[in-house]
Amino acid sequence: MIPRNPQIMPIGIQSFATIRNQGMSYVDKTALIYELTQRPYAYFLSRPRRFGKSLLLDTMQAYFEGKKELFEGLAIMDLEKDWTPRPVIRLDLSRISAATETKLEEGLKVLVANEFERYGLTVRADCVNSELMFGNLIEQLYQTSGKGVVVLIDEYDKGLVDVLRDEAQLERNTAVLRPFFTQIKALGECLRLTFITGVARFRHVTIFSGLNNLNDISLDPRYATICGFTQEELTDNFRPQIEALGAKLGQSPEEAIETLRQQYDGYRFTEATELVYNPFSIVNCLDKLKLSNFWAMSGTSKILVDFLKNSHYNLADLDGSKISGDRLADIYNSRNPVPLFYQTGYLTICDVRGDRYTLTYPNAEVKQALLEYLAPEYIGIDDVDMSNKLYDIKDAFADADVDAIMRSLQSLLGSIPYHLWDNEDKEKTYHRLIHVFFMMAGISTQSERAVSGGRIDMLCQTPKRVYIFEFKLDGTAEEALAQIDEKGYPLPWRADGREVYKIGVGFSSSKRNITSWIIA
């Protein structure tokens, strides 16, 4: 009999057996696992880090090894009648170094050798590299068991993501991995099922060029919720913790659920509209009974900033960006950082039209992570100094103190290193920077907002007020304010009920800063 102690949260535990044997909270995904595993395919699933991929594979391993006792009380018990054990090869590539192709090759050999040892088998003498060892392991397990072998590979792309900024090393690591994965196709008749996880598919570096039968389910709506928690799963499995969190925050359970939804929900990986929570953050939040950026603090990558700086994109461009499904699966593109931000979990799908996907930030945790950890490095300002000034901007908007807003902007713009300015298009640079500052301060901001009279340079809205900004490069604040009136920019908000502020702003290209402003 499996013990029941759902108050114990599985913090950092990726072992299905440990979670079940200790009676920890477990969100039941076994019906989906059963449905998925009835077809003898080679599957691929892309999800962000710390989204439950390793636990998913561990659950699959326990299922294929026939460990029926671990599944007591779960949905799969009403579906599976056989429970015949099968040989399972489990390889976790996150455990090996990929700094060089030699280290990657040696790491693969160690992983495969460990599986030989686990099954009491001996590597054939002529198997001198990881590719041949892997193939030999599959053959021996098939021959000795008489059953199709299951291959489960976790974080297959570790050897690629680690060297993304070094294209030569990326190509050398690709040359190691490509023949290794080719064994899956070459020995397909020996396999019952293959399941590979990672952050991205790397279509254009041809790791899977020999795996033309690979079934990529990353965007398949049938498996939209196979990783992460749905709203129903959250409330069904964690009600006591939600009530405890609400009590600590001074909220009812329903209010606490709404707080959690805004903070950690919002992920959408397919055309299916049901959203999922980040499981890592939810489990940590409900264990510690506090709201924090748990997922972001567990490893924000500098590579995001590097790719953004080397592209034509700005932080303000990411929200609302559009991309095809094919490109969405391609993380390695130095000219377009959008797939990288999606694959790593900083953007998610908000709309699907055919094969065109619109992306946005999933929740408050991710927005705060981008703004607190990535934006200061991207812009080049000390994060503590920036944080203080952003709080000043937020307070100034709340108090309708436009002069304070502009003074804070002057201070922030004056802190930006000289080399970060685009000398070819200074107007575009400062316009985007101000958008990012307002966004970081939590202000609803739109650039180039189209109205009947033209395009508003920048529109900021709060529950009580509307702020219309017009900027003039090497012009006067008076000219900017005159354009707001001439074009009739305030007209859409005339009957809105909110106060409307018109702000004309003059900007100096030589001083790289705001030099004047007028408020009306």
Image (tube, helix red, strand yellow):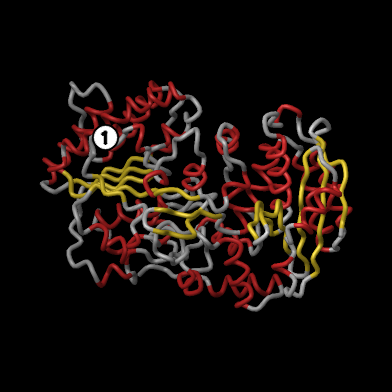
Image quarter where the N terminus lies is: bottom left
Identity of the residue drawn at 70% across and 49% down: 435
Label 1 crowding class (10 Å Cα cut-off): few <14, some 14-19, many 20+?
some
Residue situated in front as seen by the camera: 131 or 4: 131
The answer to whether residue 5 is above or below residue 85 is below
Q: Where does residue 482 sit, x and y in percent of width and height?
A: 82, 53
Q: Residue at x 61, y 41 (%)?
A: 314
332 on left or right of 411:
left
Question: At label 1, which amino acid type do we have?
Answer: Ser
Residue 277 x/y as whole percent: 51, 62
Residue 480 image offset from top left, x and y in percent: 80, 49
Quadrant location, the C terminus: bottom right
Q: Residue furthest front?
A: 486
Residue with the mark numbered 1: 209
Nearest the viewer among 115 and 503 is 503
Q: x%, y% of residue 228?
A: 45, 60
Quarter holding residue 283 = bottom right
From the viewer's perspective, tell me whether residue 516 is left or right of residue 493. Answer: right
Of residues 21 and 326, the one nearer the viewer is 326
In the image, 59 versus 298, the foreground residue is 298
Q: Quadrant of residue 353?
A: bottom left
